[in-house]
Image (tube, rainbow, N blue to C red):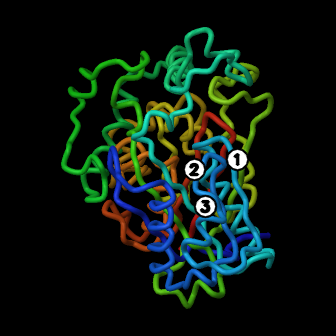
Amino acid sequence: MLKDKTAIVGIGQTEFAKRLEASELELACRAIKAALDDAGVHPSEVDALGSYTMEESQEVDVARNLGMGDIVYFSQVGYGGGAGCGAVGQVATAIAAGVARVGVVWRSRKRGDPTKRVWAQVQARVDDHWKHSRPYGLVRPVDEVALLMRRYMHETGATRDHLANVALAARRHGNMNPRSVMHGRPLTRAQYMEARWISEPLCLYDNCLESDGALAVVITSAARAKDCPHPPAYIHAWSQGISRQHQPMTNYHSENPLKSTSSAAAANLWRQSDFQPKDVQVAQLYDAFTPLILFSLEAYGFCGPGEAPAFSEGGALELGGRLPINTSGGSLSEAYIHGMNLVTEAVRQIRGTSTAQVANCTVSLVTSAAAVPTGAVLLRR
């Protein structure tokens, strides 16, 4: 078992903004160096690297620019927003197995550049799984999620008020966070309801930000973690997941399109864990779009099928509620860096240093995207 054998001991990030001048490689190196400094680890000690297949900063360039030594393990995980937790888990597994000693996982993005958005690139021929959706009007991820949400609303009675519960919780937490792009920019329910449509039933505030920036974490063995400057966030359990007959985003071929890949990741996560959903005090749930939060609440067992709308009511998702989520502001209100800021915030909650801190937090969940092959990591103090 990998339980508690490794820990995240360092976190680092750059500033977040709509457009930054630095290259993706420069941003990556700055975030990694900040994480290493935070961990008290010299770059020459790093021997494992993990990232996303969509990461443009290659391992060789990162290692050379930061003065790392021999790298003995490196891996990348696909599916965009589904990759972050898997990248962390794979590096942690390599360290627990003794293949490597010190690992770094990072994500760097220049999302402010429209050419970096895959769906904005015109192709002569639509191939792969997109041939089942894009010719029929589902040209962007938001269109695909909107289609799933429309079916969810029909089956459960969910309304836009329930989506607003998610957006408002993220914004209120983001308002507490000076690093957040939306810091100092409050959002009211009336503003949410009056916002322009992006893809019905999803409005502007149901969509993540478009951000430039980078984040990184440092992972070591549990034994070494005890000597690092900050309280370790032990990696108690992790899993990836692809549900049966899954098709990314639309899930057309599944018997139940609303049963996301998170269901597979969750079942395996809880199988390995000493904790269950009732023990989780705070959750960083992947939130490129607000419906993914409702889907994840059900997939990870915080409520039953169709119960997420009611679960979200009464401030339940905000600090002081039954399950505070995305306490840095998340992708909706802090920055959208493919979910890596959810990982760093989960660590802050364990350390007790979040700007929306849950009191005496000992168990913190972070997840990747519910609409594609995904992953999850459970951290403990």
Circle 3 residue? 378
Circle 2 residue? 367
Point 51% across, 69% down: residue:
32
The quadrant holding residue 68 is bottom right
The quadrant holding residue 129 is top right
**Residues under labels 2 and 3: Cα distance?**
9 Å
Q: Position of residue 104 (x, y in %)?
A: 60, 69
Q: Do the residues labelled 1 and 2 touch (CB within 8 Å)?
A: yes
Mark 3 or mark 1, which is nearer the start of the sequence? 1
**Residues under labels 1 and 2: Cα distance?**
9 Å
Location of residue 280 with respect to 198 vertically, above or below = below
Q: What element carries label 3?
A: strand
The amino acid type found where label 2 is placed reads Thr
Q: Where is residue 99 in the image (x, y as percent from the top left)?
A: 80, 76
The amino acid type found where label 3 is placed reads Leu
**Residues under labels 1 and 3: Cα distance?**
12 Å
Mark 3 or mark 2, which is nearer the start of the sequence? 2
Point 38% across, 39% down: residue:
209
Q: Position of residue 40 (x, y in %)?
A: 50, 85
